[in-house]
Image: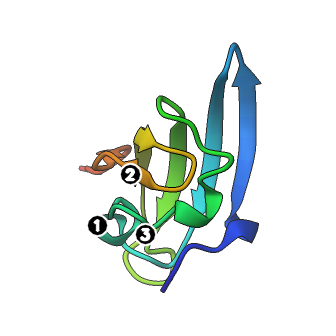
Amino acid sequence: MAFESKNLSVLAYSNGFTLWHYATVDVAADVDTSGYFNEAADMLRTGDMVMANVDTDGTPAAGIFLVSSSTGSAVDLADITAVGAVNTD
């Protein structure tokens, strides 16, 4: 699939930093591909973080992406840092 702007929302903003939330049916490896968020390049800034729910229609996962670069026209996210990846009970 592709980036869907309706699924990106601001959770918090302070001191030039924005914490975002994004939900998608895409897997994390697709979401952190350079260019996936280019449509939102005018909003996402280097250093912002995106809390994400990925693969929501498959094997759901959650985590945090760091916006590693944003030039105003191109966005790249670092690989996801998983949250709750292991559940042993």
Residue annotated with mark 3: 60
Give how far across and how far down residue 75 sits, in percent.
46, 53
Q: Quadrant of residue 65?
A: top left
Local SS, label 2: strand
Q: Quadrant of residue 60?
A: bottom left
Q: Residues within 10 Å of mark 1 (few under 14, many from 20)?
A: few
Local SS, label 3: loop
Q: Quadrant of residue 78?
A: top left
Marks 3/1: CA–CA distance: 13 Å
Give how far across and how far down residue 32 sits, in percent.
35, 59
Give amino acid for label 2: Asp
Q: Which mark is residue 29?
A: 1
Q: Residues within 10 Å of mark 2 (few under 14, many from 20)?
A: many
Q: Which mark is residue 76?
A: 2
The reply to whether residue 66 is in sight is no
Question: Residue visible at 56% across and 73% down?
Answer: 3
Question: Is 4 located above or below residue 63 in the figure?
Answer: below
